[in-house]
Each structure stands twice: as C-alpha cells, then as structure tokens.
Image (spheres, rainbow, N blue to C red):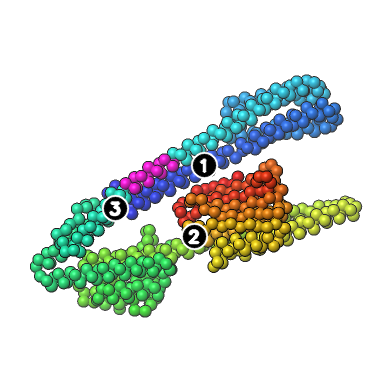
Amino acid sequence: MMRWLRSSLPARAGLAVILIAVLALASSLSAGLIAWFSQGDAAAINTAGSVRMETYHLSWKLAAGATPSEIVAITDSLQTRLTSQSLKAVLEDGPTAALQISYGQIQQQWNEDLRPALERGDAAAFQVKAHSFVEQLNQFVDLLQRQSEQKQGWQQAIQGLALFTTMIVLLIGLYELQYGVVTPLKELVDATQRFRRGDFKVRVNHQSQDELGQLATSFNTMAETIEESHRTLESQVQQKTLNLQQANAALELLYQSSRSLATRLANAEGLDELIRRFQQRLPGLRLSLCLQGQLQAPAQQLLALHGANIREVCASSDCATCQRHPKTNPQIFSISNQGSELGELKAHFVDGHPMQAWETRLIQALANLIGTSLSLKRQREQDHRLLLLEERTIIARELHDSLAQALSYMKLQVSRMQTLMRRGEPVQTLETVTAELREGLNNAYRQLRELLTTFRLQIHDAGLVQELKDTAEEFSRRGEFQVHLHVDTLAFELTASEQIHILQITREALSNCLRHAHAQNAWLQLRQDGETVRLLVEDDGRGFGGNIDQREHHGLNIMDERARSLGGQLQIFSREPQGTRVQLEFHPEFLGQQTEGSAT
C-alpha cells in the first residue's frame, strides 16, 4: 500500500481528498445525531414553562373567586401538561439523576400539596405552596437547559477536532505539493531550457517512484540517447529530432483536443476527428476505437471508429476477423476512467514495426483523454438529472406547503358544511361556512397563480441584475410602495442555480411585503462583502411582533430551504424604527466549498 502511494501522485492526492471528505462527513453526521438527540429539549422546556403559567393562572383564578368548574378545567390542563409525553421523552432519552429527582419532586409536590389543596378548595394553602412549586419548576427548566447546552458543547468539540485534523491534512498536502511536485517541476523546466540551448549533458537529479520521477527518468534517457546520437551519426540526430517533433506535435494535439473536449460533450464525430488528426501526426499509425454502451453489463454490440469518417456497429466476436488490422497483432489500450471500462483503443503501424516507448505513452495518453472525455460526458448527464430531480423536489415541496394545505382546509370546510346541513343548522351559520369556503378558494387560487409565476421564472441573457430590476419594477407597479434597487457589480459570475435561488427569495420577500407589510417603501440590495454575497430586502411597514411561526408561513419555509440549498444563512428580524428586514448571506460556489447554514 505504501509503495503504491509513493509511486503515484494522484493516489496521494486522492487519499488527502478522501480523508478530508471523511472528516467532513463525520462532522456532519455527528452534528446531525446530536441535533436529533436534542430535538425534544425545546418542547420539554416549553411544556415546563406552560406548567408554570398554569400555576400562575390557578393562583389568579383562586384569588378572583372563580367557579369550581373553571378551577377543575385549569387543574386538569396542568395535570395533562405535567405528565405530557414531551417531558417523559426527555427523561427517557437521556435520564440524569438530577433531572429524575427534580421531576419527581415536582410530581410529589403537586400530588401531595397543591392538588389536595385545590380539591379541598383551600385557596390560602395553595397560594402558600405555589411559590415553592414554581421555584422547583424553574430548577427543572434550568436542568433541561444545561443538558441541551452540554449536547451543543459536544457538537462544537467534534467539529473543532474535525477542522483541526483537516488543517493538518491540508498542511501535509501543501508540503507534499512543494517538495514532491513544484520543486521537481522547476528542475524539469530548467533542464528542458538548458537542453533547448544545446546543453545535451544536462540531467535531472530528481529521483522518485511517482509520475514525476518517471518523467525525469524518461527525460534523462531521452537526453542520453540524443547525446549519444549526436556524437555518432548525424542521421540518428535527425531521426531523433523528427521523433521529438512528432511527439511534441502529438502532445500539442492532445492538449488542444483536451481543451476542445472539455468545453463540449464528446460524440462519435468529435472522437473520429481526434483519431484522424492523431494518425496524421504519427505517419503510418492506424487506430481503431471500439466503444461499449452500458457499464453495468457486457455489450453485445460495439461502435468502432477508425478516423476516416467510417462508423461500424459490430459484435464483440468480430474483433478477431476485423479487416482494419489484417495479419497484425494490434496493441490494445484500455479506455477506462475510475475503474469503469468504456472500451478499448487498438493501434498498429502499417509497416509492422513495434512501437517505441514514447509512441506507446502518447497513444496511452490519447486513450486516457478519450476515457476522461467520455466520463465527463456521463457525469454531466448525471449532474443534469440531479438538477432536474432537485427542481422537481422544490416544486413538490412548494405545492405541498401552499396549495395542498389550502385544498385540505377547504376539504375540511366542506365536511363541516355537510355536517351542519345534516343537523339542520340555520342559514346564517351555513352562509358563514360558505364565506370561509369562498375565502379559502380565493386564497388557493392566489397561491396557484404565485406558484405558476414561480415555476415560469428563468434567468434570461440580460443576467441577474436585469431580472432584479424587472422584479423591482413589477412589484412597484403591483403594490402601493416604491422599490429602491441597489446592486453591486460582483467580481465573479454566480451559477445559474444561485441566480435562480436569489431571484426566488427576492420575489417571495417582496410578495410578503405586498401582502402583509402595508409599507410605503422597500429597499432591495445585492452586495459583495469579501467572499460573501449578501441579499437584503427591507421595508418600512408594520413589521411583526414576537417570534415567527414558520409552520403558518410556508413562504418563509421555502426561503429557508432555498438558503440552505445555497449553503447560506437567512435572517428575518425587525427594522428600526419600523418594518422588516430579510437578509441572505452565502458563500458562492465559484469561491470554493460552501458551508451549511440555517435560518434565524
């Protein structure tokens, strides 16, 4: 294993990437597990708080002289909350002695002191015991908070350790890059320049088992051969010079072909042209490219390309009698990428002479280039399928969170009306339900129109800036407020997915401003702060009070999902002196790996 790592630069680089990926995956999994274990803590804290509020409620009712039925109703509510599943779930998931004791004391004080006092109607005794009961509840809530904070501390420690280990791997990688790649390359470049100036005695001193070591050995061998040829016969020098020229031309062809195949998908016409041009660079060389279709099963038929605008579809059993390689044993180069066999490249010379080492390496490089281009084509197709799947998932989620909810509401209202009609309720009651149905239908229709607008949204050739301008003008026309736009010129180009998410979040924020804010002005800003892109939507409307229940605002959930798709952070808070502020920050894909964010 170590010998293999020392002999391959890609293997070492791949190992570093795998280590970093494993560390990132371990960090993410640990964060997910801890978050999963902590998901009931907030509910338990809220339930304990509601028990405290019910205690205060009882004290107030007793002092106000409430009726026994009201006292019984509040008592039953408090008992239900005290024995709720959310509190028991926290104790079952991660029981600690302090939590168990505190919860037991609360149960004991309620059952032995407070509830008997209520049953006796002794308001004075209840008032006396209520204070210590509330203090015990506060202690229980404090223990729950400490348990949640301890889980968060574990999460931070694990992520910090993963980050530290990642930095160590990166430092080792930089060291290997400097002393295993950069320095040998500089030596090779210097030796090449001296050799070009006529210093045929120059040699590369770098020795290793990896690709650069092989390249250095090949360079030294080439230099020795040329030097010996130069000392013996001029004809040998000319022959070697011709070989070098052909090799350089073939390398140039490989480079140009790689650039061409990297910018467009590989197809039969392009590959056939590549083979034809390669054969022109090496006179007498004949190549046949045989491609198989599926990777999962052996191909029954092959597609053969010969570099002469001739395509053949033949069976794999026909290779032994192929007329393109008569009376020869062609050398076969495998077309593969990442262990997947994609086909093979057959090569021979017309005069039958065996291939030289440099010719073999060039043809192998051609085979590797073809394999890489075919793999990139399939990868791009897979990425396209994934993008389609992601977009369909977003559409399904938005339909579920908006239109499906509205239709479910109307279905319940229809069932309610049928029940009222069977009971013979008055017409006024039925008209109220009918009005609610009409309102629900109007709401569903409005949501459907918004969804249709969202699904038809696209970025045209004018770019994101023009789309934001059009959006600002559209909402200025639709609403009774003015949208003020300010867009910075970014130092890089955002991906199509990033542009769509930014535009969708902008439209959703302005739509909320139009429907709920009653604002006079709105401000839309897109700025670049270092390596962070910030989208800001503000208004001077009535704002909001307290926390936002996102279960009742599917638009906020959609914006949150899109922010997480960007690997960014979405914040919604009040604006001074009045209004609402929606802010999105994310790290563009162009600048490197994105970090997972959450909404506030």
Residue type for callout 2: Glu
Q: Measure how far apart labels 2 and 3 are at the Cα level.
A: 30 Å
Q: Kindly identify which residue carries mark 2.
A: 493
Residue drawn at x 36%, y 74% is: 272
x and y, in percent, of residue 495 in the image:
51, 60
- As drawn, is 495 to the left or to the right of 410? left
Q: Position of residue 412 (x, y in %)?
A: 77, 53
Q: Main secondary structure of the magenta part?
A: helix
Which of pointers 2 and 3 lies earlier in the amino acid sequence?
3
**Residue position for label 3:** 182
Q: Quadrant of residue 415?
A: bottom right
Label 3: state its secondary structure.
helix
Q: CA distance from mark 1 to mark 2?
A: 32 Å
Image spot of residue 74 (x, y percent): 78, 32
Q: In terms of depth relative to the viewer, which is nearer, 202 or 598?
A: 202
Image: 303 above or below 529: below
Find the magenta span and give its range.
Answer: 162-175
* Label 1 sits on residue: 31
Q: Is residue 381 magenta?
A: no
Q: Amino acid at mark 1?
A: Ala
**Is 471 placed left or right of 341 in the picture?**
right
Mark 1 surroundings within 10 Å by alpha-carbon count, few (fewer than 14), some (14 through 19), many (20 or more): some
Nearest to viewer (mark 2 / mark 3): 2
Q: Find out whether residue 174 is within the magenta segment.
A: yes
Q: Quadrant of the C terminus?
A: top right
